[in-house]
Image (cartoon, rainbow, N blue to C red):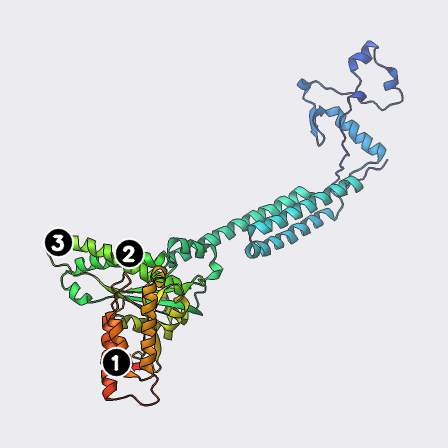
């Protein structure tokens, strides 16, 4: 009789469910009551089954059987030649599966994420499990699926944890970098989608906003450094909130000035509209702020000078990214459209406007917000003329018939002025000056009319050249 074993001298019986019908009680044999047919011609093994004799064993198919049955099932395996085999290639195959599965985990977890990788792992588990069962059921081969899958799962769990730690570190870095630039909602959106962030610098279409306090030098003379700092904080906080609530990014504070932009680091197709609505919201914050400051001034026994701000907005291509030195840098923007936005803010007081818009910004919002033509101006530092516009209100103002009328009157006057029909243009300016105000902002058409009256008077004496295109060259910022 030859019994096959593996290289370590082991054999694996093909265990089956225990069949109590094959048991014959020794007591029945001794008493002569046992059925002789159950023993005659059979290989019979004598053993114990009492629990107290400590010969109760566990096998894959039973949790508790007498130890004697283990010997019986081994003998049945030998007689039936129903050996289970552990082929010599089994260990190498299991290690290969672990190696391939491990490599798959290493590649997939960082690239496609834990969820998709788990789905791959689940398919692998089903495949390895089925293969192991098929080898056992059809060929009585023992292929260890448990060790293989546990090893792959441990690797998957480790890689998933490390990937999670890396992602959390990246999110923490993003939150730290942008917490003071963006609203909390935008910071979380950016932290959850770090691939949308390009810190190295990129060209994007942006809307820029500059906001500055008018006459701040006079106001600051009333305060010591501590009081002035408190005043600046009281001013910048509500203005900043108005920007952040409308998806804006705070670039920097320059004393009493705010610089902000839209459409970076996150995409915002409505960046011009959000910028203009932020400007209107900032102006709306000024009245309650001044009311609070007036009460404080009375309590402190000093004169209250209302705070007024001027804003300039412009849209166009700009470079945005981390800019600075190796030691310190900020997420900021550079470009010609940035410089123009700053110049437009400087022109707001000249034209009697709260908000002055560049041509691209106006083109994006004119169908929804109330804007008027202001001028065709060559701002300081530029070599070409730029059309500029005043923002006077939201959609409610735009839809007023009286605003539509004054909007058309101003446009007609501008066209007449640029065609050098100065006498007619002057009469139109007088009509515009007399037209009643139909918006809530402090913006006034008086300064605009003064500008054109003065220019027309000059041009009527000293006419511009025949090829004049209507541009006015500004000599101040």
Count residues near mark 3 (Cα–Cα under 10 Å), then give few for <14, some for 14-19, many for 20+: few
- For numbered disc 1, what is the local secondary structure? loop
Q: Quadrant of residue 369?
A: bottom left
Q: Is residue 99 left or right of residue 470?
A: right
As displayed, is residue 446 above or below residue 156? Answer: below
Q: Earlier in the sequence, mark 3 or mark 2?
A: 2
> Which numbered circle lies on residue 238?
2
Find the distance from the CA under tag 3 to the CA under tag 2: 22 Å
Q: Position of residue 47 (x, y in %)?
A: 76, 21
Residue pictured at 31% horizontal, 77% vertical = 413
Q: Is residue 359 left or right of residue 222?
A: right
Quadrant that contains the C terminus: bottom left
Instruction: Spot the residue most to the right.
Output: 41
Residue 101 visible in the snapshot:
yes
Q: Position of residue 447 (x, y in %)?
A: 23, 72
- For numbered disc 2, what is the local secondary structure? helix
> Which numbered circle lies on residue 475?
1
Count residues near mark 1 (Cα–Cα under 10 Å), then give few for <14, some for 14-19, many for 20+: few
As displayed, is residue 291 above or below residue 254? Answer: above
Contact between marks 1 and 3 (CB within 8 A): the answer is no
Q: Earlier in the sequence, mark 1 or mark 3?
A: 3
- For numbered disc 3, what is the local secondary structure? helix
Question: For mark 3, what is the residue?
Answer: 298
């Amino acid at each position: 009789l030859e019994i096959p074993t593996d290289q370590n001298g082991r054999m694996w019986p093909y265990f089956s469910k225990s069949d109590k019908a094959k048991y014959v009680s020794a007591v029945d044999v001794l008493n002569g009551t046992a059925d002789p047919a159950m023993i005659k011609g059979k290989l019979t093994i004598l053993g114990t089954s009492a629990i107290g004799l400590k010969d109760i064993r566990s096998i894959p198919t039973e949790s508790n059987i007498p130890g004697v049955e283990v010997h019986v099932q081994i003998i049945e395996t030998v007689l039936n030649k129903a050996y289970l085999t552990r082929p010599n290639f089994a260990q190498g195959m299991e290690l290969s599966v672990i190696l391939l599965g491990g490599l798959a985990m290493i590649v997939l977890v960082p690239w496609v994420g834990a969820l998709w990788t788990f789905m791959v792992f689940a398919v692998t588990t089903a495949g390895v499990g089925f293969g192991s069962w098929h080898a056992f059921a059809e060929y009585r081969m023992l292929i260890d699926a448990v060790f293989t899958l546990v090893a792959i799962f441990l690797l998957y769990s480790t890689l998933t944890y490390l990937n999670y730690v890396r992602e959390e570190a990246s999110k923490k870095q993003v939150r730290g970098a942008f917490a003071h630039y963006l609203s909390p909602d935008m910071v979380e959106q950016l932290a959850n989608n770090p691939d949308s962030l390009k810190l190295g610098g990129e060209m994007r279409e942006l809307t820029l906003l500059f906001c500055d306090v008018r006459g701040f030098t006079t106001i600051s003379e009333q305060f010591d450094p501590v009081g002035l700092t408190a005043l600046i904080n009281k001013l910048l906080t509500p203005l900043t909130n108005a920007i952040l609530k409308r998806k804006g990014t705070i670039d920097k504070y320059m004393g009493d000035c705010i610089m902000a932009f839209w459409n970076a680091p996150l995409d915002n197709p409505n960046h011009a509209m959000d910028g203009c609505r932020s400007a209107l919201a900032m102006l709306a914050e000024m009245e309650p702020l001044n009311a609070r400051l007036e009460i404080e001034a009375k309590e402190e026994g000093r004169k209250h000078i209302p705070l007024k701000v001027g804003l300039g907005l412009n849209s166009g291509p700009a470079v945005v990214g981390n800019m600075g030195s190796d030691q310190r840098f900020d997420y900021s923007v550079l470009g010609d459209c940035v410089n123009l936005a700053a110049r437009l803010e400087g022109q707001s007081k000249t034209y009697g406007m709260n908000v002055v818009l560049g041509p691209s910004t106006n083109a994006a919002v004119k169908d929804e917000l109330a804007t008027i033509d202001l001028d065709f101006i060559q701002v300081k530092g530029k070599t070409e003329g730029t059309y500029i516009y005043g923002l006077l209100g939201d959609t409610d103002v735009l839809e007023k018939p009286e605003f539509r009328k004054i909007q058309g009157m101003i446009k007609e006057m501008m066209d007449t002025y640029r065609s050098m029909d100065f006498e007619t243009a002057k009469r139109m300016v007088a009509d515009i000056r007399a037209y009643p105000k139909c918006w809530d902002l402090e913006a006034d058409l008086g300064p605009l009319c003064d500008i054109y009256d003065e220019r027309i008077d000059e041009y009527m004496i000293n006419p511009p050249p025949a090829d004049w295109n209507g541009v006015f060259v500004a000599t101040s910022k």
